[in-house]
Image (spheres, grey):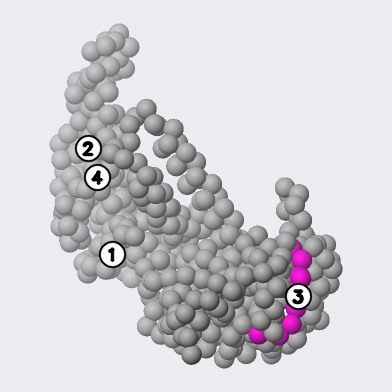
Amino acid sequence: MKHDFLDKYSNLDSPIHRLDPRVKILSVFLGIIIIVSEPLGELFHFLLYFVIIALLVVLSRVPLKYLLMRCLIVSPFILMAAAFLPLSRMVSPELQPDYSGYSVYQASLTILFKAYSAVILLVLLTSTEKFQRLLLGIRKLKMPRLIGVISALMYRYIFLLTDEVLKTTRARESRTPGTLKISKVKVYGNQMAMIFIRSWERAHRVYDSMLSRGFNGEFPDTRKLRLSQNDVFLSVIFIGILLVIRLGI
Amino acid sequence: MPTGIKIENLNFSYTHGKKVLNNITVDIQPGERFGVIGPSGAGKSTLLLHLNGILSGQGTVQIGETIVDKKSIPDVRRQVGLVFQNPDDQLFNPTVEEDVAFGPLNFGLSGETVSERVREALKAMNLIGFEKLTSHHLSLGERKRVALATVLAMRPEVIALDEPFSNLDPAMVMQLMKILKALDATLVLVSQSILPIVACCDRMAILKDGEIVAIGPPRQLAANIELMRSSGLDLSFYRKIFKEIFPE
């Protein structure tokens, strides 16, 4: 079975790829916090953020098409949230919150800017680092171990789950003449239930196999990360520029 | 050093009630290659899980001098390596190297020792060059070899394998049999593929409905047509086909 991977472009060589994963994680999360905390309607500031993010994308050499495709996945949710404001104003104008003097359209644009900035930064983070190094970075940053363990297993087994979905879909389609009618929605329900049961049973077997090799709740790890002055310097510059824009200095 | 296994009056039922193992008693010698065959649902995999303390029923399971119970589980897991039927249940780390290192690291070995063991296990399984690969990108035969390497790296005294020959092509079956014969450990092989078990085991037990119905030399048991038929393992079909293909 063929799968797409989160870290598909992690083998490229660029200044962003070469950064320590801890620096990348911290920079991205601080960056997102700064951008999201920007007040409503500061559209010029958002344009500046976008320029910086675009610069990072160019530096990273991650293909723009890939980045846009990733953004497309979350677009329905972002667009729905952004469209909700003007629509709700039309339906019930008396229930509108105070936008501090800005128009509802400016508020909508703010949502779009904030959401896409965060998504692009996160896609950049996962595309420029191997997933296992990101997990290692998370662990070295003293995040709860359970989060690392769950993420590692989820990343490993998401592909097996995808296989299960593909296999059961093939099995269903092979016995379904033409397209499945909406009236037969129960079939989809049964398929989902079977996938859930199989996943549940597999989880038990995986856990048994971990126990049989001495697993006691903690993933052993001897890998090391090296933090250079250059990494810290670049991270400080990035966060510094965002802060300058945010504070309007 | 291979160690022996002693199972006495082992009984086990899952929560839904049906008895899966019924009064199992067997004595496996150190270094012996012991096969367990039986139809689906006979309790073969359940029996295997008792060797490592993952399941515990009524009765005694003894690995060398150690009786398997809650207290001895860390020791038992050091001694007994389990290779699961489906390698996807066993391989959960991002790379082959990390999966093979998982067991030795859990037992607190130093980084240098772990690296050495990983290298040796991969070499034994003819997997040098696979270290940085992702296991779910490999073929089933390769994944099965990685799964065995994950256990070899722990240097267990007993290796228990659940359906090691399933879904392998004949060349891979031959290769695996060669690897298994060369291992310096007591082997317990559970399988529905009777012929490889007959070919590579010193002794074999037939399990039916949770009971051992026969135990002895594999060829002798396999030749007992009536016993095999009554155990749900009728080989006459294979005999007929082989006679047709190779009439001389």
Front disc: 3 or 4: 3
Quarter holding residue A217: bottom right
- Which residue does the image show at 37% across and 83% down from the upper left? B129
Q: Position of residue A105 (x, y in %)?
A: 19, 24
State the mark number for residue B214.
Answer: 3
Give the labeled residue for mark 1: A10
Q: Is residue B87 above or below residue A65?
A: below
* Residue type pointed to by label 1: Ser
Residue B168 on image: x %, y % = 46, 74
Q: Which residue is mark 4?
A: A71
Residue marked by disc 2: A113
Query: Image check: A125 left or right of A193?
Result: left
Crowding near pointer 2: few (<14 within 10 Å), some, many (20+)? many
Residue at image location 60% in from the left, 74% down from the top: B235
Q: Which residues are magenta?
A: B210-219
Q: Depth-wise, is mark 2 or mark 1 nearer the camera?
A: 1
Judge whether residue A102 is colored magenta: no
